[in-house]
Amino acid sequence: MAQLIATAQKETGHYYLPTGEPCHGDLRQARKQKAYPSPTTIMGAVLARPGLDNWKQENAILQCMTTPRLDGETDADFARRVVAGSKGDLQAAADRGTYVHQLSEAAVNGTDPGNLQAGFEPHWESLKYWARFVQKVHKCEEVVVNHDEGYAGRVDLICEWGDKHEQTTEVVDFKTRKFKKIGKLIPDMPGYATHDEPHKVDSYDTDIIQLAAYAYAVFDEPVAARSVYIDPITGAIENKLWTPEEVEAAYDIFCKTLAIWRWMKKYDPREVVA
């Protein structure tokens, strides 16, 4: 029988103090500081993440196919190098996503992003065009806290979206996600408007559940939400608008997920006595 390779990692997550300040560390440290878990921490421990999971599996297979064997290398050592390469690709993808988020924040606030990293010029042009429809910013890259349910997280954007004639309040989340299809280009038009055919990109239930958690940390009533998908290679943008009714239904699922998380972790910060 082939030797099993231990690849388990220490549990990580994002936690925030009730004041909204970040709590550095894992769940053990969060317990000490009576910190709240983030929506992504809650969902990551309970719900399947089909997009990310599929990408990890495909990337691991590609790593195995393209990584050359070394002379005299054991199967265990080869497997460890494959795993290390997969983790490197995952970190690179996370770094790209972080940088695109920085560009989106600059576009929304109308600030100079500085010297663009090579290859991200299309992303910046797309985001600048998209930001034209942001009429008023309520929150941008701010931590929101739901004391009633005991969770907190950093929301990308809450804004008034639309044109000068009609606007709606929306909770927005930016995600880098590879498109399955890119629309046909139209010359001389910036950003995602350079396409006269719709893009094809997957959206997942977890997208709206995360947005719903942010929405109900700020509003008592459901509001619209928008997932903004950005292709990491081309910079093309596609929008997925979620109705207030969909947000309300997703929040019910989030609260049930949160209840499962509390039961699994044996931790409810609302019950901690100061």
Image: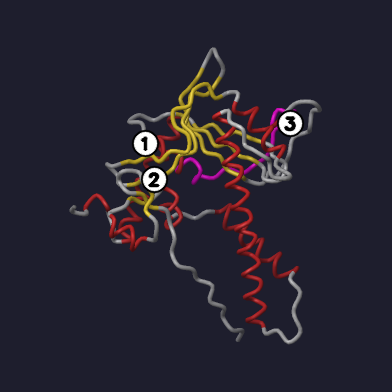
Residue situated in front as seen by the camera: 233 or 241: 233
Nearer the N terminus, badge 1 or badge 3?
3
Identify the residue shown where x is 68% and y is 38%.
Answer: 123
Whether label 2 touches label 1, CB < 8 Å:
yes
Q: For residue 81: magenta?
A: no
Q: Amino acid at mark 2?
A: Phe
Provide the residue designation for mark 1: 216
Q: Which of these two is toward me, 255 or 30?
A: 30
Q: Residue 253: image x %, image y %? A: 39, 45
The tag on residue 254 is: 2
Which percent across, then down, holds residue 210? 45, 43
Mark 1, Cα crowd under 10 Å, few <14 / some 14-19 / many 20+, is: some
Name the front one of labels 2 and 1: 1
Q: Amino acid at mark 1?
A: Tyr
Instruction: Give the residue drawn at x 34%, y 41%.
Output: 145
**What are the residue bounds of the magenta stretch?**
192-209
Q: Residue furthest top?
A: 165
Residue 162 lies, in percent from the top left, at: 55, 21
Badge 3 local density, few (<14 within 10 Å), some, or many (20+)?
few
Q: Residue furthest right?
A: 187
* Residue 182 place in picture, x, y as percent: 73, 39
Separation (CA) of disc 1 from disc 3: 34 Å
From the viewer's perspective, is residue 265 above or below residue 256? below
For disc 2, the neighbor class at 10 Å (few under 14, some 14 to 19, many from 20) is: many
Q: Which residue is mark 3?
A: 197
The residue at the point 67 percent across, 85 percent down is 74
Give the quarter of the image for residue 240. Answer: top right
The N terminus lies in quadrant = bottom right
Rendering quarter of residue 47: bottom left
